[in-house]
Image (cartoon, rainbow, N blue to C red):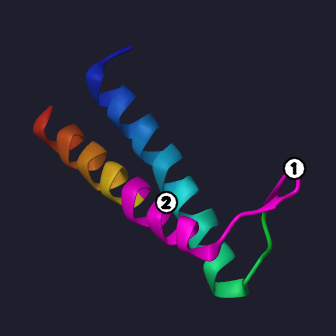
Amino acid sequence: MKNKTYFITVSIVFVAITSLHFLRIVFDWPARIGSWDVPIWLSWLAVTLAGTLAYYGFRLEKKED
C-alpha cells in the first residue's frame, strides 16, 4: 500500500470516529460499556484527538504529492 493511500484511509476512519462522537454529544446519545455509563466529556476528548489525527493524516497526504 502506498503512503498516500494509507493516509487517506486512516484519515477517513478518524473522520468517521470524530463524526460519531460529535453526534453523540449533539443528540445526547447514551453510551454504556458493561455497567459503566460513558461520560460525555470522554466524547469531547475523542472528538479532539480523532479530529486532530484526521487533520494531520490529510495534511501528510498532501505532502506526499
At x 56%, y 55%, the residue is 16
Total labels: the figure holds 2
Location of mark 1 (residue) = 34
Position above or below: 13 against 51: above
Q: Is residue 58 left or right of residue 22?
A: left
Residue 30 falls in which quadrant of the image?
bottom right
* Residue type, mark 1 in image: Gly
The magenta stretch is: 32-50
Mark 2 residue type: Ala
Task: Give residue 57's position: percent from left, percent from top.
Answer: 29, 43
- Residue pushed farthest right? 35
Is 34 magenta? The answer is: yes
Kindly tell me whether residue 4 is visible in this rendering. yes
The crowd level at tag 1 (other Cα within 10 Å; few <14, some 14-19, many 20+) is few
The x, y position of residue 32, in whole percent, is 82, 60
Residue ID at (38%, 27%) = 6
Q: Relative to the observer, which residue lies in front, 64 or 28?
A: 28
**Residue 65 showing in the rendered view:** no
Q: Label for residue 46?
A: 2
